Amino acid sequence: PQRPLPFLARQWVKQAGIALEAYGIQLLAAPQIASLQQRLSQGGMSEVDRFRAAMTLYENYLHGRIAADSLVQTMLRAVEREDNPLVATSLVGYATSVLPYASDRGVGECKLLDLSRHHSLRGVRTSSLRYLSTSAQSEAVLDSMFVEWQQGDNPLLTVNDWMRGAYHLAQYLPSKRQEILSRQRARLTTDDARSEFDFVSRGCDTTPSVQDSLFASLLQVENRRVEPWAAQLLSLLNDPISEPHNNRFLLPALDALEEVQRTSAIFFPGDWLAALLSHHRSEEARALVSGWITRHPDYPTPLMNKVKQNAYRLLLGR
């Protein structure tokens, strides 16, 4: 089936001088997949073919034809030798989008850590480090990210990156939570940054009663006035570290969506849904969201499309 060409692909084919307005999903048999993975990993393909191979393998993964671990390994092996910035960052993007579904994500995280330190392309180093600073879960990589955060001088990361990294570390290293939050706040140089930090960092406390109270506060419009802060807080409350407790937030937040739309800027409903749904992986969460969709057959189409768009990875389970 044809579908509009993604923005990144449009930019690539434009640079390559190719006239192309749509693309088809090419579903492959197992031997073809294995051959394409080997060719992409080993090199020897043209830049256009490498980009096309990566996209094709990722789409076959979404259709359930490649295991998450296998795809992550292929993408990270390929990026080791990649010298084209656009192809390389695409490979990292595919790998990191699938890594949460891998059975041994620690292996992938260690590889990303190595790429963040040694790859020749700055874009690869930046995207790998940025992902790990906000998403790492394996003990060894978390420890490395803590050391990186303590030093706080890596030019690949921005002030906002360091803030988001501090939120993540404070959740996953609870014994160091107060140290991390206090030190990160002391680094901030503006009143606006400190106000944002004070609002959002409350979500780093994974105590169920605290999270319940914070979530209830977000259902009140006056607590969503600064919408990017509200979305970041909601995202922290729905982090995997708090599952399954945070599954209880799914239905109330979905039920509030129409009210959120009425009281917010045009793009905030999508941000609300992304913060709510992006991190959930469990069967319970899948059943809750799927059931909510089924029970709302006459829901406003634009909003329902946003729900499905943001829930598709959860509903697919990959």
Image (cartoon, helix red, strand yellow):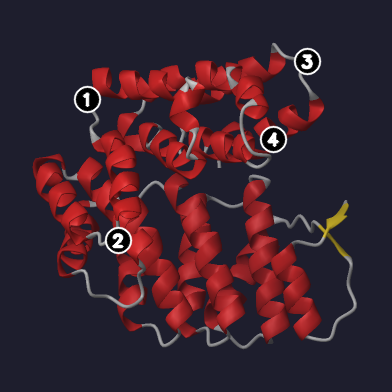
Residue at image x 30%, y 61%? Answer: 162
The CA span between labels 3 and 4 is 14 Å
State the residue at coordinates (69%, 87%): 46
Marked residue nearer the N-terminal end (3 or 2):
2
In the picture of the structure, the residue carrying the numbered disc 3 is 297
Percent position of residue 309, x then y: 68, 39
Residue 177: image x %, image y %? 15, 43
Asked if the residues shown at circle 1 and circle 4 are in contact, with their CB atoms under 8 angstroms apart, the answer is: no
Does the residue at mark 2 contact the one at mark 4 (Cβ under 8 Å)? no
The answer to whether the residues at label 3 and label 4 have Cβ atoms under 8 Å apart is no
Disc 2 + disc 1, Cβ < 8 Å: no
Q: CA distance from mark 2 to mark 4?
A: 30 Å
What is the distance, in whole Å, between disc 1 and disc 4 at their CAs? 30 Å
Tell me, yes or no, whether the two marked residues, 3 and 2, touch with CB atoms within 8 Å.
no
| Local SS, label 4 | helix
State the separation of the CA atoms marked 1 and 3.
Answer: 36 Å
Residue 29, how many percent across, how many down?
Answer: 72, 56
* Residue 265 horizontal/vertical position (percent): 64, 38
- The residue at which mark 2 appears reads as 162
Residue 277 higher or lower than 11, as above or below: above
Quadrant (top left/top right/bottom left/bottom right) for the C terminus:
top right
Does label 1 or label 3 sit earlier along the sequence?
1
Residue 94, quarter of picture: bottom right
Sequence-first tag of 3 and 4: 3
Q: Which mark is residue 306?
A: 4
Mark 3 or 2: the one toward you:
2
Amino acid marked by disc 4 = Lys
Residue 207 is marked as: 1
Classify mark 2: residues with Cα within 10 Å, few (<14), some (14-19) or many (20+). many
Instruction: Identify residue type, mark 1.
Output: Thr
SS at mark 3 in the image: loop
Check disc 1 and report its element: helix, strand or loop.
loop
